[in-house]
Structure formats: structure tokens, C-alpha cells
Amino acid sequence: MSTVSIIKCNSYNSVEPAIKEAVKLLGGTEKFFKSGQRVLIKPNILSAKVPEKAVTTHPEVIRAIIRLVKSAGAIPSVGESPGGVIGGAEKFWEKSGIKKVCEEEKCRMLFFERTGTVCVDSKNPKNKTLKQLEIAKPCLEYDCVISVPKFKTHNLVFFTGAVKNLYGCIPGLRKSMYHKFAPHPDEFSEIIVDVLAIVKPKLSIMDAVVGMEGEGPASGKPRNIGLIMASDDAVAIDTVMCEIAGFDPKKVYYLKSAAELKLGTNEIEKIKITGEKIENVKLKKFKIPTSFYLYFIPKRLAKFLGKFVSALPVMDKKKCTKCMTCIKSCPVKAIELKGIPVVDRQKCILCLCCIELCPEDAVEIRYSALIRFLLFMRKIKRMEFL
């Protein structure tokens, strides 16, 4: 049976003992790595944002895990490929505070854009879009991979946790390009599941001290949650994350698909919870992404209704600095500079990379009148199918 430990932690000043306790409740470090083994710590460094924005894994969480690994006699490295790396990855590491922590703790940093890749055959029979995936070498060569996500919403796949965090094992702009081949959330989710099947993290430790709600993973609002969670099952910890947020985990497609492939469990009754009980830490009125209501319209119905249920990313003139990140990151070249970047409705596949990777939060989704009406109605009375 998969186990998820939940520990209360209201401040980043106290994450070290919380993480120690969370791992201890799983059976201790010896269950995951031994003295002399190499351990890859995989944080979420989505964009060049300061820790207070709750976009990236907090640096103090990474510090605590580095120390935990060293205390067991193992050799830690921190590795990641940030989203939309335009002009070099170092600024992402610096802004997030993780570079400073690695330097202070004398821990090796691995920029996956520079470590080389391995072309791996797909291990997910439901991934119909890619026969092979390029994975950063360290993710396959280290003795243990620890996924260290942030507790966040995601405007394409609804939630991003330990499983989605592994998508950063794909280096550089390949991450954006894969969206081109899998534009629908269900198709993209199968690629995420494929990465999980390939990388196989032994341990997941979730930063849920301060998470993100609303229009995540980059433009949502920080939400105090006050937890550290850990698990030997990436699917299980994400399932518990959804339960704490008050969201049905079976509506998160990548969790459902991963469970069907026996990569973990998404059934809460089959997960052993240690530490705090879920009912004691459940969040009230946790905001999920607006896009959830768009993507749960059946494909055929959406195609029939066409522009009446459409959405399009638009740029805020006041916030946009014309940094070109959205243009360079768009996998289908649907954005052109016309004073400010403008999205071509005919080309856009709604992968939302432009929103996710904009360093200024200058991109938002503009919904059709029908979608806006449904959202308005939801505020008045919660719809049964929502």
C-alpha cells in the first residue's frame, strides 16, 4: 500500500524538522537511498520568480532535503530545466533562491540543458503522439530521484504536483515543442505519465507551506496551506493534494492514466495516511483554474459550438515588456509582435505556454461570451456538472 505523510509546517523556518519527520513516517531515508549513492533532487523552477510568488519550490525546502541526503551519507545534486529558457537558465536558479542555497550547502547544480539527453522509447502505450522522449541523462543515471514539487493549480491539467514536476526532466524548449504534438490536455497528460514511467522517482516531498490557487502554475495567488507532505508514490501524493484542495482526483486525467498503468494509486481509500488526517487539513474555498470549466466540455460538443466556447490568450499592454518569451516559446508560432505580442486565433492550440512562461504575468485568457456566462452562473449557483 502506498503511504503519504502529512506534517503541519506553518513557516519555512521550520521545514527541516518537518521534512525529517515526513520521511521518517515513510520508513526513513534508508528506504530510499544509502550511503555513497547519488541522489537527484528535482525542484520546480518554472520561471524566474522570487520565492514569495509561490511559483517555484521554496529554497529552504531544497536546503532541508540536501541536508537530509547528506546526513544519510548519500551525495545530493539539484537538477532542473526551467520552463521557456530564453537567454540562459542561470537567472531562473538565481531568482528562485535555489542557486544561493546550493552554493551555501556546497551541492552540485545540474542544468539539464547542458547535461546531455537520452532518447528513450515511450513506456506509455496510451501516448499516441510521441514514440520517443528526450530525457536529461542525470534523471536516468542517478540512484534515486526525489521529486520536490510545489502545491499548485495548473491551467492545462488542473493540478501540478509530484508527477507533473517530472516534466522538467525534459530539457530546454523541447518541453514547449511537445505541446505541439499533444495540444489537448488528455493527450498532453499521456506524455506526463510517460515521463513518470521512465524516470520513476523513489521519493516525493511536496512544498505545501505556501501553495498556489487560481490561475496556476504561474499567475495564481499564493495560498497559505501550512503543510509538508512526502510519499513513496508520486501519484498518491498528488491524489492527497487534490483531496486537501477539495477537488476530485479522478478528474485529473494524468492521475487516472498513471493509476491505470499501475504507476501509483489515485484511490484515496487505498492510500495509507500518516501524520495529520486529511479531514483536519482540508482547505476551504480553494480556487481552481477557470480553464477547468472549458476543458470539461466534451470534445465533440466543443467542436460543434466552435467560437461560442472558445478561449484565447491576450497580452496586457501595461504589463508586457516585449521580452519575446511568449513568441519564442510558442510551439506552433502562433504569436507575432504587432506593437505587443498578438495571438493568431487560427494557429493557437491553447497549450497556454505563453501564460505559464511570461515573466511579467502579462498574459491572460479571454473567454467567449458563453463561457463567461457559465462562469457567472457558477458564482450564483454551483452547477451540478461542475
Image (cartoon, helix red, strand yellow):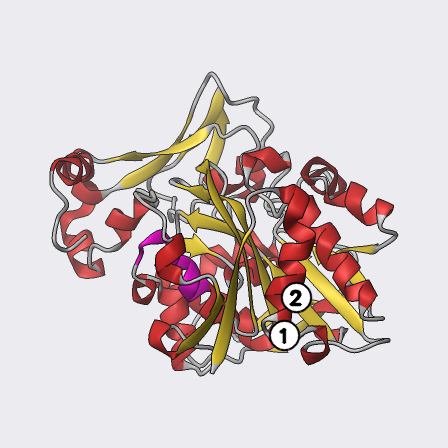
Whether label 2 touches label 1, CB < 8 Å: yes
Percent x, y for residue 157?
A: 39, 56
Question: Most prominent secondary structure in the magenta stretch?
Answer: helix
Q: Residue at x 73, y 65 (%)?
A: 40
Numbered badge on residue 146: 2
Return the residue at label 1.
Answer: 202
Relative side of 135 to 161, left or right: right
Nearest the camera: 184 or 154? 154
Q: Is residue 245 left or right of residue 43?
A: left
Question: Magenta segment range?
Answer: 238-247
Is 213 above or below relative to 129? above
Tell me the kind of residue under disc 2: Ile
Asked if one can make out residue 137 in the rendered structure from this viewpoint, the answer is no
Q: Residue at x 64, y 34 (%)?
A: 50
Q: Position of residue 300 (x, y in %)?
A: 18, 60
Q: Locate residue 68 relative to residue 175 in the image: left or right.
A: right
Q: Nearer the viewer, residue 21 or 329?
A: 21
Q: Residue at x 38, y 80 (%)?
A: 260
Q: Estimate how packed mark 2 is, as few (under 14), some (14 to 19) or many (20 or more) residues with alpha carbons within 10 Å.
A: many
> In the displayed structure, does residue 9 sit left or right of residue 267?
right
